[in-house]
Image: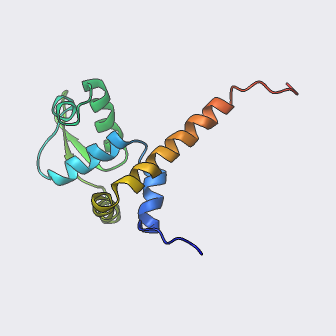
Amino acid sequence: MIKATAIADDVRRFVLTSVPSIPYLEAMLLLRNEVGTGWDNRALAQRLYLNEKTAAGLLSDLQEAGILRAEGDAPALYFYAPESDSLRAIIDRLATAYSTHLVEITHLIHSTSARKAQQFADAFKWRKDS
């Protein structure tokens, strides 16, 4: 018997391909929930209990992904502004899924991170035939 998943396939695919970490997800959803509010690295760092350098990286990554827009000079303020309706829709669906399936989505993100870490480690393994 095949176990039905509670997370829609498109949301699962988005998480696996586009959400590299829990802090990334939390930052994205925080800004989504605070539409119209500008965030800088200091405010995000305080809200998510991160250091400012990590928060700045998250904001930059989310901007590059087309999820946020930046305004002003350093320190820029970032606003939730997905570049397409389809991106906005999948993030909305992810937010809904995360509110009811937090553990499953967290496991998805961690499984991707663990797989990438293992692939990186495997690249440095000594091979008998080398």
Q: Quadrant of residue 57?
A: top left
Q: In the rendered view, would you say 125 is above or below 36?
A: above
From the top left corner, tell me how far across and down residue 63 is, in percent: 31, 43
Q: Is residue 66 left or right of residue 42?
A: right
Task: Indicate the quadrant containing the N terminus: top left, top right, bottom left or bottom right.
Answer: bottom right
**Residue 13 in view of the camera:** yes
Residue at the image position 56 percent from the left and 39 percent from the top: 116
Task: Indicate the quadrant containing the C terminus: top left, top right, bottom left or bottom right.
Answer: top right
For the image shown, how many numbered marks are present on the structure?
0
Residue at the image position 18 percent from the left and 28 percent from the top: 42
**Residue 80 in view of the camera:** no
Residue at the image position 48 percent from the left and 52 percent from the top: 17
From the top left corner, tell me how far across and down residue 108 is, in percent: 46, 52
Taking depth in this image into account, of 52 and 106 the one nearest to the observer is 106
Residue sitting farthest toward the front: 1
Taking depth in this image into account, of 95 and 68 the one nearest to the observer is 95
Taking depth in this image into account, of 115 and 66 the one nearest to the observer is 115
From the top left corner, tell me how far across and down residue 80 is, in percent: 21, 50
Q: Quadrant of residue 96?
A: bottom left
Q: Quadrant of residue 23?
A: top left
